Amino acid sequence: MERRVKNPFSRPWMEGVGAASAAQPGSIGLKGIIAGGITGGIEICITFPTEYVKTQLQLDEKAGGQKQYTGIADCVKKTVKSHGFLGLYRGLSVLLYGSIPKSAVRFGAFEEFKKRMVNEKGVLSPGGRLLCGLGAGVCEALLAVTPMETVKVKFINDQLSGNPKYKGFFHGVTTIVKQEGIGGVYKGVTATVIKQGSNQAIRFFVMESMKDLYRGGDPSKPVPKYMVGAFGALAGAASVFGNTPVDVVKTRMQGLEASRYKNTWDCFSTIWKNEGPLAFYKGTVPRLSRVCLDVAITFMIYDSFMEMFNKFWP
């Protein structure tokens, strides 16, 4: 077990959960990218309707005292009535296309930061995990999440109009870049960096802390997948309550009416002035359900694929 602890390439959040932690350093990166991409695709298909509803509620501003939706159920009901059940999956293709590069950047960056921060025994301290998670979140925000999220939000926002202009993913991206330039897919980058950085910092920290507590000081003690899922749900919940205000600002900055805001701070100030502080927690319930399920599923499925890969891919 001493060799496994000292291995700077082993994933701290997967230690003791199965064969994933025993993969060879030379192949774990590629395995992680593939396993993460598959996991992300499955997770998105399961949880996307809650992401759709969350985004709609965050975009539903008080315009002249009139709001389009009264709540979660009303949003689902009106969407299905107007666009059918598949209307709840508007913008799904964007997340599917972005899942693999997002996973690659997140896990790749975390491994690189971790390799540089472990101590002489190969152990990453709680503070180190927090910083590595923050760094991984910032990297994925800049290289993958911001463009993906901007296009996704514009797709969902576009459905609110009577005559949607985006016919598909590539048509939407082409239209956005043509009309707004490459900066059109980098709206809300500051808020996204803050959101993703805090997301990963909180989740990795909570996950590792819960695992350490479960192991009771024995790093070799395996953590069952159902416990990994439970810890993932707690980590997801912590990140939701910690950064939903940032998520609301990010969503507004990436919507079709983002031009009304001068910058991220102006968006924050405008929401606070016109809608009050509670507006920063719009969509919390659907986001909470999605994120908890998201993180739980991600950790459990990811580990399962890594175990399978290690059996057939030495």
Image (spheres, helix red, strand yellow):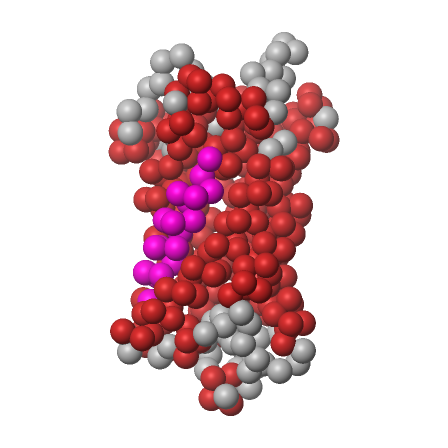
Which residue corresponds to the image point at 32% horizontal and 66% vertical from the top-left? 30
Q: Which residues are magenta?
A: 31-49
Q: Residue 291: x percent and y percent?
A: 55, 47
Q: Image quadrant for the C terminus? A: bottom left
Percent position (x, y) of residue 127?
A: 64, 68
Q: Is residue 228 left or right of residue 156?
A: right
Residue 163 position (above or below residue 269): above
Q: From this viewpoint, is residue 162 visible? A: yes
Residue 310 in magenta stretch: no
- Please give the name of the residue rendered at 63% of the width and 37% of the height, measured from the top-left corner: 284
Prevalent SS, magenta region: helix
Give whichever of 224, 153 is nearer the camera: 224
Residue 68 higher or lower than 191, as above or below = above
Instruction: Say whether residue 102 is left or right of residue 196.
Output: left
Residue at (61, 70) in percent of width and height:
211
Q: Residue at x 35, y 44 (%)?
A: 96
Q: Is residue 260 left or right of residue 266?
A: left
